[in-house]
Image (cartoon, helix red, strand yellow):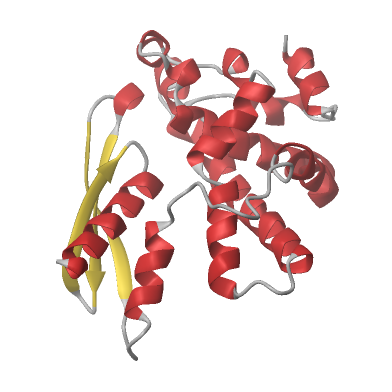
Amino acid sequence: MIKDLETAIGYRFRNITLLQNALTHSSYANERWHNSLMSNERLEFLGDSILGMVVAEYLFRTFPDRPEGELTRMRADMVCEKTLARVAAHIELGRHLMLGNGEEQGGGRSRDSILADAVESVIAASFLDGGMDAARQFIQKFVLVEVPVKQLHNADYKTALQELVQQKKNQTLSYALVGESGPDHDKRFEVEVSLNGRVIGTGSGSSKKRAEQMAAQNALNQMKM
């Protein structure tokens, strides 16, 4: 069955265990081996950075007349959870995932956050197996096909908040994870955003990234009041 995924991706792995690792959710690793380090979370970390860099380079070269702020928002739209979940749906990534029983029963195969993380993990696996060319090929084929030239669909509240506070000098924004709750298949993360050490917003979400966005949105709303 994993060969079907390789066909959909258009890349054959020399080391198939890398792809298998990319498909292993933490719930499965914890149930099977009691070791989250055997899940795809480390690959997700690497893939997130590779994806961001390749998309940033593409936008920089393709739109020489766009300012930094607009390029940042375009990149955020292209690498957001919903966009990556659509990529996962296109290659039917969900049916190849290895999930724990609780995540399986909770509809994990269609959960956007899990699918998006898996896409980033596959990108990292491609990179480790075939170098930057393999990772770039995946990104060009599945991510760079919908460039939000005219309208940005994803609200990047973190960037908007950063741009707002930078209107004054010596302003420092920081995000802190202050809590986690729920089972593995339905985690909730709580984040605080601080300006110069003072908390200005809080937010929660199904991932740390989403919680940070919600905290930034909350801070923006507070500043407008």
Residue 186 pos. (x, y %)? 31, 25
Is residue 221 toward the left or the right of residue 64 in the image? left
Quadrant of the rendered structure where residue 18 is? top right
Q: Is residue 22 visible?
A: no
Q: Residue at x 49, y 25 (%)?
A: 25
**Residue 112 sits above or below residue 109 on the image:** below
Q: Quadrant of residue 92?
A: top right
Instruction: Please tell me whether residue 26 is drawn above or below residue 78 in the rendered image.
Output: above
The image quadrant where one finds the C terminus is bottom left
- Looking at the picture, how far across and down is residue 123, in whole percent? 68, 40
Identify the residue shown where x is 23% and y is 49%: 203
Q: Residue at x 57, y 38 (%)?
A: 83
Describe residue 126's horizontal placement relative to residue 49 as left or right.
right
Residue 175 appears in which quarter of the rendering? bottom left
Q: Residue furthest bottom?
A: 169
| Name of the residue lying farthest toward the front | 150
Relative to the observer, which residue lies in front, 209 or 221?
A: 221
Tell me if I can see residue 145 in this picture.
yes
Image quarter of the N terminus: top right
Q: Percent x, y for residue 197?
A: 20, 75
Residue 96: x and y, percent?
Answer: 62, 15
Horizontally, residue 165 falls left or right of residue 92, namely left
Q: How many marks?
A: 0
